[in-house]
Amino acid sequence: MRREFVLVLLAGAVGAGLVVLAVRQAWAQAIFTPPRPLPAQDISVTGQQLVPLASALALAALACLAAVIATRSVIRRAVGALLAVLGAGTAAAASAGVRTATVLAAARASALDGPLGGSTTSGASSGGAVHGIVISGAGRAVLAGAPWRAAAVAGAVVVLLAGLATVWRGPRWPVMSSRFERSRQGGASPRANTESMWESLSRDVDPTVDGGTRT
């Protein structure tokens, strides 16, 4: 059971991590063709810019995996259901169709936030103005991140399966904190130890010596 527990948690963490890694890669290229003699501009657009929801849901899934460790029984099953929902939502977001307008808008926003678009010095301002003219012209999108999008979907599916496995088998898995709880229940409470020490002192018995000795 413990091995199965660890394997499911590891699979869920790897799946969510794969999604986060995949969406940070370039999924598309925005190519702007301004009037001559200005040069064409090629801007990479990441999956994070196109489908930010996928990354947010993957991070939420990682937090949900931590909750699986801390819960048990019916609550753990409910957390597993939430994990499955997060995985399904991530897969849907990562596999959603990307429109040309979305790619171009994300590229323009990225370019305006860049060093040229956000510059305030006189020399860079002229460069920023030219850059603004370039990205305001006609553009086209080239989708080039199909492998990374497939990786994101695959990672989301792994998270979904980890959630379903938690719903099915979660209540049977051990609780990570059970050893700590047993040791806490087996030992005397601090209050009981304090009362015992004062009682020993009232009888002129040294409580720091095994068996107790009279002072």
Image: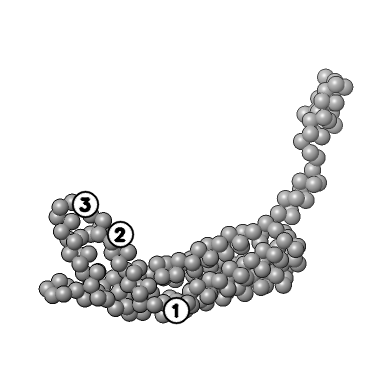
User: What's under tag 2, amino acid-wise?
Assistant: Asp
The location of residue 209, given as percent across then percent down, is: 79, 29
The quadrant in which the N terminus is found is bottom right
The quadrant in which the C terminus is found is top right
Q: Residue at x 12, y 73 (%)?
A: 37
Q: Secondary structure at mark 1?
A: loop
User: What's under tag 3, amino acid-wise?
Assistant: Thr
Extreme residue in the right direction: 203
Q: Nearer the viewer, residue 141 or 137?
A: 137
Residue 24 seen in this snapshot: no
User: What's under tag 1, amino acid-wise?
Assistant: Gly
Residue 136 seen in this snapshot: yes
Q: Secondary structure at mark 3?
A: loop
Instruction: Say whether disc 3 or disc 2 marks the residue closer to the N-terminus.
Output: 2
Q: Which residue is mark 3?
A: 120
Up the image or down, 87 lies above or below 112; here it is: below
The location of residue 159, given as percent across then percent down, is: 58, 71
Q: Which residue is mark 2?
A: 113
Q: Which residue is mark 1?
A: 97
Q: Secondary structure at mark 2?
A: loop
